[in-house]
Image (cartoon, grey):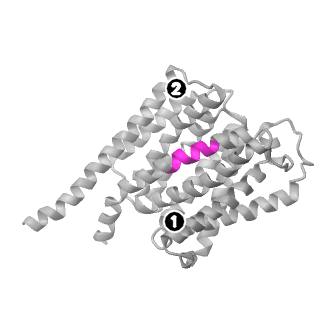
Amino acid sequence: MATVRSARISNNAGGIYCIVIGMAVITAQDAAIKWLSTDYALHQIMLTRAVIGLGVALVILRIEGGLHLLRTRHPGWHVVRGLLLIVASIALLLAISAMPLAEAVAIFFVAPLVITGLSVPVLGERVGIRRWAAVLVGLVGVIVMTRPGAELFNWIALLPVVAAVCYASMQMITRRLGATDSAGSMTFSMQAMMIIFSLAIGLSIGDGRFAGSGSASLDFLLRAWVWPETGDLWLFAWCGFASGISSYFMSQAYRLGTAAAVAPFEYVALPMAMAWGFALWGDWPDSTAFAGMALILGAGIYTLRREHLDRGRSIDRPRAARRR
């Protein structure tokens, strides 16, 4: 048991690197989806993304060892994990379509705090006071950046919160499944469920008969399917590729590292979202937003430093034991 625990500790740094890569890819994907949301239906984007993502998952499985890795002793947990991600994706993407990208992402970032909190009762992981402090500092940074006001607290602003809770619950399952199932198999099952769900929605309401409500989020959900413009095809392709790659890295992150160590580094998506918001829509953060960003980045850098120190100690202890 001690060996397993030390192995997990020694892989936390790898999990952190994976989550940073995954968040960079998924933030770029969110920006592309926001760009497409004014002309295309959510379920059309989700279906195209999932079909391409499934192809990426098959390539990953091939690299990992072959299709035999799809065999699992926990098919029910794969289904639950997929459903949670579907709800999280829909809720967050609907929010992104109607809100500035950075605001939606910032509100969503109650997720790392939820993950850290759930990791104690659900996974039995130990969270030290310093990591708790770092996560709380990051959360304060999110609050500073969002500056909650009356204009934010409507039903649309609740969607990222719903997404965060579902996402955090999904990552608890990822951590459990990671002991027996590969990241490639989890990516494959997730993309397959997304295809089934998107097809079902598209076949039932894809003609657009319920569109025209005047709400950006509802119209994004209920809009009719149309053939993409030639210039938009590469954005659809990118969303699919990004979905497969980000799913792999995020699954791998929680397989390699403890939830409490990995979760705070999801905060790096916030400054990334701000960069995309400025580049594409001219949204530039003010001094208060920059202060929040500094808190978030500072908390993440501190946690990474603590992780490297812990890793060094775990390596030095066996060496010291051998010398004795």
Give the percent coordinates (x, y) of residue 267.
Answer: 48, 41
**How packed is label 1: few (under 14 Cα within 10 Å), some, or many (20 or more)?**
many
Question: Where is residue 123 drawn, in percent x and y?
Answer: 44, 63
Q: Secondary structure at mark 1?
A: helix
Quick check: 43 left or right of 210?
left
Q: What residue appears at the point 40 percent right and 58 percent down from the top-left corner?
A: 257
- The three-letter code of the residue at mark 1 reads Ala
Residue 233 shown left or right of residue 275 in the figure = right
* Image spot of residue 224 (x, y percent): 87, 48
Name the disc covering residue 289, or none: 2
Cα separation between marks 2 and 1: 35 Å
What is the crowding at mark 2: few (fewer than 14 residues within 10 Å), some, or many (at least 20)? some
Please report the bounds of the magenta region as a residue range. Answer: 22-30
Q: CB under 8 Å between callouts 2 and 1?
A: no
Residue at image position (44%, 46%) is 264
As rendered, which of 281 and 145 lies closer to the eye?
Answer: 281
Q: Please report whichever mark, 2 or 1, sits nearer to the chain's N-terminal start.
A: 1
Q: Mark 2: which secondary structure?
A: helix
Q: In this picture, is 319 found above or below 262?
A: below
Check disc 2 and give the amino acid type: Ala
Q: Is residue 25 magenta?
A: yes
Q: Quadrant of residue 121?
A: bottom left
Q: Which residue is mark 1?
A: 183
Residue at horizontal 56 percent and vertical 77 percent from the top: 72
Residue drawn at x 41%, y 56% is 15
Which residue in the rendered view is the most extreme toward the right?
Answer: 209
User: Image quadrant for the C terminus?
Assistant: bottom left
Q: Main secondary structure of the magenta part?
A: helix
